[in-house]
Image (tube, rainbow, N blue to C red):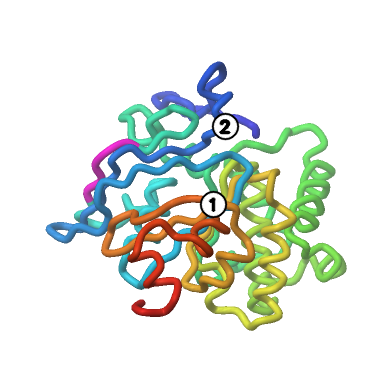
Amino acid sequence: MVSPTPSADAQPVTPQTGAAAAVDVVLRCEQVSVSYGEKAAVHSVDLAVEAGRVTSFIGPSGCGKSTLLRTFNRMNEFIPGVRIDGRVLYRGQDLYARDVDPVQVRRCIGMVFQKPNPFPKSIYNNIAWGPLINGMVPRAGRRGYLDDLVERCLRGAALWDEVKDRLDENGLALSGGQQQRLCIARALAMEPEIILMDEPCSALDPRSTQRIEDLIDELRGRYTIIIVTHNMQQAARVSDKTAFFYVGELVEFGDTDQLFRRPREKRTEDYITGRFG
């Protein structure tokens, strides 16, 4: 991962080296709670996310999955009245420390939303725009650099072969599944270490969903992926680790196969067997 260039008054978000890195935990929650005004949405969550793995968050609607996901790249700060307690650590660094720039956080920790949201620009500029405005593109050989970047990211999102002859077309002209893969390619262009996916397949047809799931499998290992999903079968298919949330509480977290086959908590078993949810 390329470390962001800090602004004049902000501490750069960079991975730490040494003993902490050997544990291979890229993201850690320590007693994280989130409230919207007087309403508590997430309660005292402790969670460690391993680098290079796919982690799924499952649970009924309103249980805090997406709220917790948004704390990882400080997206909740756009919501009036939100309060976040505890610590969110990226490679040991507190992402909510006063001197950490949230823009830099979002360069290290990218996000793909539930509804595809391409920029109203060409397919090419959907990929190139972020690196350009963030000063990531060298002045010398700029066009060649961008051409290589666009192709690499579109290939990384399994979209290149479908759009390579129409890069000047508006990204909004693509199908829903293609738009979502374009958004993933756009996230890859910022060279993140972590990609957050908030129900990325909920608005897609089964064929497009399969393409996204195949893509997640291809990205596994190169990126750390955290996905929120209401589809338990999807969580079982794509993830290495699964966390089950209920009423803002992290009930159980462990290897996906273990959680679905031999859950330790009765609430987990009741949820995955359809007794509630």
Q: Is residue 237 magenta?
A: no
Q: Amino acid at mark 2?
A: Asp
Q: Name the side, left or right, on which 181 lies relative to 225.
A: right
**Residue drawn at x 32%, y 36% as measured from the top left:** 87
Which label sits in the foreground, 2 or 1? Answer: 1
Among all residues in the image, which is located at the extreme top?
A: 18
**Residue drawn at x 67%, y 48% as measured from the top left:** 189
Which residue is the site of mark 1? 255
The picture places residue 30, in percent across and down from the top left corner, at: 33, 37
Task: Classify residue 37 by image quadrant.
Answer: bottom left
Q: Name the side, left or right, on which 163 lies relative to 271.
A: right
Which stretch did the figure color magenta? Answer: 83-87
Which residue is the site of mark 2? 24
Q: Quadrant of the N terminus?
A: top right
The picture places residue 158, in percent across and down from the top left corner, at: 78, 62
Q: Main secondary structure of the magenta part?
A: strand
- Could you say which is closer to the camera, residue 208 or residue 126? 208
